[in-house]
Image (tube, rainbow, N blue to C red):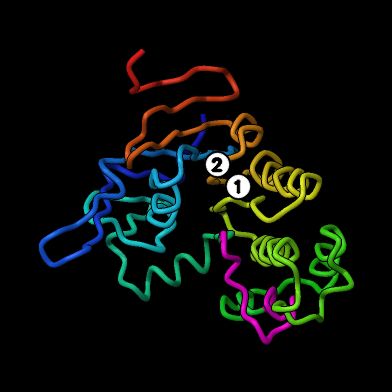
Amino acid sequence: METITVRSRDVTKRYAVRRDMSVTVLDGIDFEASGGRVTGITGPSGGGKSTLLYCLSGLERPTTGSVEVLGQPLEKLSKRALLLFRRQHIGFLFQSYNLISGMSAKANVLLPLRLAHKKVSTERIDSLFESFGLSAQREEDVSHLSGGEQQRVALIRLLVSDPEVIFADEPTGALDQEMGRRVIAELDRQAHQYGKTVVLVTHDPAISASCDVLYTLRDGTVVSRQGAADGRAESRESD
């Protein structure tokens, strides 16, 4: 029986644009993701996909509703406790990479390990750089790397932290087709071989089709939930 590790109930997210006006980006989102599965989120641009990912991972607080990760209600945690929880259990692959310029690729990978007081062997780190074709760039300032290279450094940083739950926002957006396949294969391996929970946002139909479960968002609401593995779908759209 699969275990639900990420769950939201009736999550809304509103942003104030003026003192007397707000914009609703998420409107009553119910969401579930399980360990050992890749759960995808897709839909048109502006539909709220990345905002949902940020709320599920604790990077943003929902305006209303609840989010639970690994049995922990995130809304009950203080800012400090939430930071520590995320550092210990959650990995996030950002669309903008979130690397620190002025530091080498390897230093960027090591930084979160030091903050979390985790130890990883040099051999493990070097093997990941080699696996993703970046052995020669380990000591380079990340600001000198291409977008695709930075994306791979960000993935290595996530993998060495060995989080239980992985969130990825357009993980292949800056990659060529071959490297994109390798990245998705690695995320798939993290879920199916190691039992991690992987939740990703994508516009790519091929990636969407490979997900075990796929949510489609439009205008801040879930319009369908499909289990790609068995072809079943629950749709809120009219025929």
C-alpha distance separating marks 1 and 2: 5 Å
Q: How many marks?
A: 2
User: Does the segment drawn in magenta span residue 108?
Assistant: yes
In the picture of the structure, the residue carrying the numbered disc 2 is 35
Q: Quadrant of residue 27?
A: top left
Toward the viewer: 209 or 37? 209
Amino acid found under the numbered disc labelled 2:
Gly
Asked whether residue 69 appears in the rendered view, the answer is yes
> Residue drawn 36% across and 50% down?
68
Q: Residue furthest bottom?
A: 102
Q: Earlier in the sequence, mark 1 or mark 2?
A: 2
The crowding category of the residue bearing disc 1, from other C-alpha atoms within 10 Å (few below 14, some 14 to 19, many at least 20), is many
**What range of the chain is rendered magenta?**
95-110
**Which of the 4 image quarters holds residue 44?**
top left
Q: Which residue lies most toward the top here?
A: 239
Q: Do we see residue 106 in this rendering? A: no
Front residue of this view, candidates 162 and 218? 218
Is 64 placed left or right of 167 in the picture?
left
Residue 175, horizontal then vertical, whole percent: 72, 53
Horizontal side of residue 97 vs 218, given as left or right? right
In this rendering, the answer to whether 185 lies above or below 79 is: above
Secondary structure state at the residue bearing disc 2 = loop
Spot the residue most to the left: 20
Question: Badge 2: few (under 14), some or many (20 or more) residues near its Cα, within 10 Å?
Answer: many
Q: Does 115 lie within the magenta span?
A: no
The tag on residue 26 is none
Residue drawn 69% across and 73% down?
Answer: 109
Question: For this view, does 91 lie left or right of residue 184?
Answer: left
Q: Which residue is mark 1?
A: 196
Label 1 secondary element: loop
Q: Are marks 1 and 2 in contact (CB under 8 Å)?
A: yes
Relative to 13, residue 221 above or below: above
